[in-house]
Image (cartoon, rainbow, N blue to C red):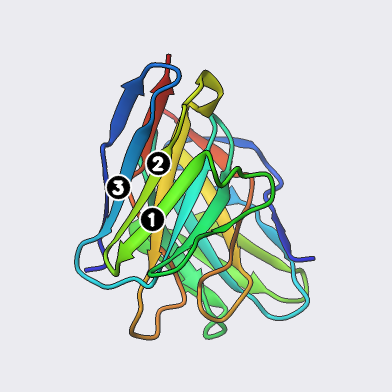
């Protein structure tokens, strides 16, 4: 069965320090993987996506993620956290080639301390 | 482009009443739309897949008679929560998959906060 795991339910960093949000997936084939961000009481915003092209994917707001097939991982990183990055982050695995079968990870809440 | 709207953004209703939530794709057509529910501090859970001109497909455990879905056009899907109860209070998010183009993703609406008193 395909699934996605986010190892940390909550990550806290200081402003200006690096961010690492971990995501591991389980899939019987090479999946498409997305990262979304959700600010409080808001909808989802796409940060970046991997669809079997370059393994290092750059997204919006300085975020990037690297697809590592050998580790079945798609960790999200940012060199320097900003206060506005505080939000909930979801890793999503796509189970088909048409983008119609999404499986959401449990989410990681990122706190950014001044 | 690829904007999805939801209306209302929040709604408060009394127990036993029905509430309709609209999901619109503003600048593209979507044969398929999706309805998700998100409880506080939890992830999104797919409730149903809405297909234009046909019946919706519900996920296991979701009551189709309670959560009525209508996808009457290529830009509009509605979710009606019938006889709402406090346990139906949640954040409901829709998404839309473009009919044309090479998109392999869904575009999400801003969500609707439902509170049932």
Q: Nearer the viewer, mark 2 or mark 3?
A: 2
Mark 1, other Cα within 10 Å: few <14 / some 14–19 / many ≥20: some
Q: Please, which residue is most extreme toward the top here?
A: B117
- Residue B80 shows which numbered tag? 2
| Quarter of the N terminus of chain A within the rendering | bottom right
Precedes in sequence: disc 2 or disc 3 = 3
Of badges 1 and 3, the one in the foreground is 1
Instruction: Report the side of B6 relative to B102 (left or right).
Output: left
Residue at position x 49%, y 42% from top?
Answer: B67
* Other residues around mark 3 within 10 Å, as few (<14) / some (14–19) / many (≥20): some
Q: Which mark is residue B22?
A: 3
Instruction: Indicate which disc residue B70 carries.
Output: 1
Q: Is residue B9 above or below residue B55?
A: above
Q: Is residue A81 visible?
A: no
Residue contact at pointers 2 and 1, CB within 8 angstroms: yes
> Where residue B65 appears, x then y in whole percent?
54, 43
Image position of A9 (left or right of B17)? right
Question: Number of labelled discs?
Answer: 3
Position in image of residue A108 (x %, y %): 58, 42
On-image quarter of the C terminus of chain A: top left
Q: Earlier in the sequence, mark 2 or mark 1?
A: 1
Q: Same chain, marks 1 and 3?
A: yes
User: What residue is rendered at 33% in x and 83% in y?
Assistant: B100
Tell me whether circle 1 and circle 3 mark residues in contact (CB < 8 Å): no
Q: Earlier in the sequence, mark 1 or mark 3?
A: 3
* Disc 2 secondary structure class: strand
């Amino acid at each position: 069965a395909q699934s996605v795991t986010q190892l940390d339910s909550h990550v806290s960093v200081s402003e200006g320090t690096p961010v690492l949000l971990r995501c591991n997936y389980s899939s019987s084939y090479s999946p498409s993987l997305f990262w979304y961000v959700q600010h409080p009481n808001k909808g989802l915003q796409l940060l970046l996506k991997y669809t079997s092209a370059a393994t290092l994917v750059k997204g919006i707001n300085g975020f990037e993620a690297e697809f590592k097939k050998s580790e079945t991982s798609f960790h999200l990183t940012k060199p320097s956290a900003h206060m506005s990055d505080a939000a909930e982050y979801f890793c999503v695995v796509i189970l088909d080639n048409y983008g119609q079968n999404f499986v959401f990870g449990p989410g990681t809440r990122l706190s950014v301390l001044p | 482009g690829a904007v999805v709207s939801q209306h209302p953004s929040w709604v408060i209703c009394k127990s036993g009443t029905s509430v309709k939530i609209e999901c619109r794709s503003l600048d593209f057509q979507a044969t398929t739309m999706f309805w998700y529910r998100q409880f506080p501090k939890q992830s999104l859970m797919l409730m149903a897949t809405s297909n234009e001109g046909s019946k919706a497909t519900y996920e296991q455990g979701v009551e189709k008679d309670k959560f009525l879905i209508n996808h009457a056009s290529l830009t509009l899907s509605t979710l009606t929560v019938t006889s709402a109860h406090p346990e139906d209070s949640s954040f409901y998010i829709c998404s839309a998959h473009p009919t044309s183009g090479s998109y392999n993703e869904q575009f999400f609406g801003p969500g609707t906060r439902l509170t049932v008193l």
